[in-house]
Amino acid sequence: MISNEKIQEMMSALGELKAAKEQEIEELRVKWLGKKGEITQLFEEFRGVSPEQKKEFGQKLNALKNAAQAKIEEMKAALNDIADAGKASFDLTKPGDRMDLGARHPISITREEIISIFKKFGYSVAEGPEIEDDWHVFGALNFPPEHPARDMQDTFFVHPQGDNPILLRTHTSSVQVRTMESSNLPIRVICPGRVFRNEAISARAHCIFHQVEGLYIDKNVSFADLKQAILLFAREMFGPDTQIRMRPSYFPFTEPSAEVDVSCNICHGKGCNICKGTGWLEILGCGMVDPNVLRASGIDPEIYSGFAFGMGIERIAMLKWQVKDLRHYFENDIRFLKEFETVI
């Protein structure tokens, strides 16, 4: 029940209130002035006071309410003063802490540059699964069962049983097959991706590496078109004075086939330790798509012809930045990666 003693007691308690946190101040406001707060409750009880006491109690209740509101505002102001004092203690002109920025991986840089070059030539990008079946990796690419050419690529088999074993793709040519099976002609695509071969890891080889393969199929495509495409790419990647040479080679899925060398961009053909004194550096393999490969994907070789090429991204990156150990690409050594911070 409302009384002078109760009002005086609450006024005394109000003077002793202390709060240092914003949440505590809000809790006090609700406790005293909220809809169910103690002072609000006194105003409810005020309705039952006799008429001759209303003036006295009314003045005291208003004084209590005003004192409570003033106390809440005082504590809020004190809290703001503390915050402002903290801000003022910082030197706003002082430079901030240095933050080390990351860098793109050299394989990613090289991959994007290769894709960018071929996109300018009108090639689109096609991708496919890393876990493939034997047909798309070997069968459709003119690798008959037990063909010795299969020994060229030591394979990781996931499920070796059955007529169409499951394996980790050994080249991104499998994406070319899927593209030929599903796309309308003409076809002009590049197929970047990660591939796997069961090889001993060394400075020149790894069991995981990255490729970009290209495919162009249309009417009247010739070997001259292939040579021109490779020359344009080489000059975009290694410089406008770059020359190429093509050496006869063998791949089951192309005929005729060739290995392509570029003139060494370090010694400019004079001979150095990078090119082993030859003046040339090997960059990719290529050739005209074998008619059997076209037939396997439902393309008539009497009407259409095409060329294909494939390059290792690690190999291109090694030549571009003279990286002598392929293992650096996979070891995540910060010292090595920092060398590419300024590469755009």
Image (cartoon, helix red, strand yellow):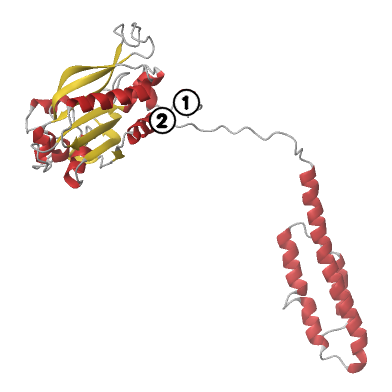
Q: Quadrant of residue 243?
A: top left
Helix, strand or loop under label 2? helix
Q: Is residue 317 visible?
A: no
Residue 38, picture quadrant: bottom right
Q: Which mark is residue 22?
A: none
- Identified by mark 2, the residue type is Ile
Q: How many marks?
A: 2
Above-or-below relation of 231 to 185: above
Q: Residue at x 39, y 18 (%)?
A: 323
Horizontally, residue 23 falls left or right of residue 12, namely: left
User: At 81% across and 83% down in the image, what residue appears?
Assistant: 43
**Helix, strand or loop status at disc 1:** helix
In the rendered view, tell whether residue 196 sits above or below residue 265: below
Label whose residue precedes the other's in the sequence (1 or 2): 2
Going by the image, does 229 lie left or right of 139? right
Q: Nearer the viewer, residue 58 or 262?
A: 262
Point out residue 133 in the picture as x, y percentages from the top left corner.
Answer: 17, 41
Q: Amino acid at mark 1?
A: Phe
Q: Which residue is mark 2?
A: 109
Q: Position of residue 128 (x, y in %)?
A: 26, 42
Q: CA distance from mark 1 to mark 2?
A: 9 Å
Q: Quadrant of residue 76?
A: bottom right
Q: Are marks 1 and 2 in contact (CB under 8 Å)?
A: yes
Categorize mark 2 by other alpha carbons within 10 Å: few (<14), some (14-19), many (20+). some
Q: Which residue is mark 1?
A: 340
Q: Which image quarter holds the N terminus?
A: bottom right
Task: In the displayed orientation, state which residue is furthest to the front.
Answer: 220
Q: Residue at x 71, y 61 (%)?
A: 23
Where is 279 relative to 73, above or below?
A: above
User: Could you tell me if residue 64 is visible in this image?
Assistant: yes
Q: Nearer the viewer, residue 176 or 209?
A: 176
- Front residue of 170 and 269: 269
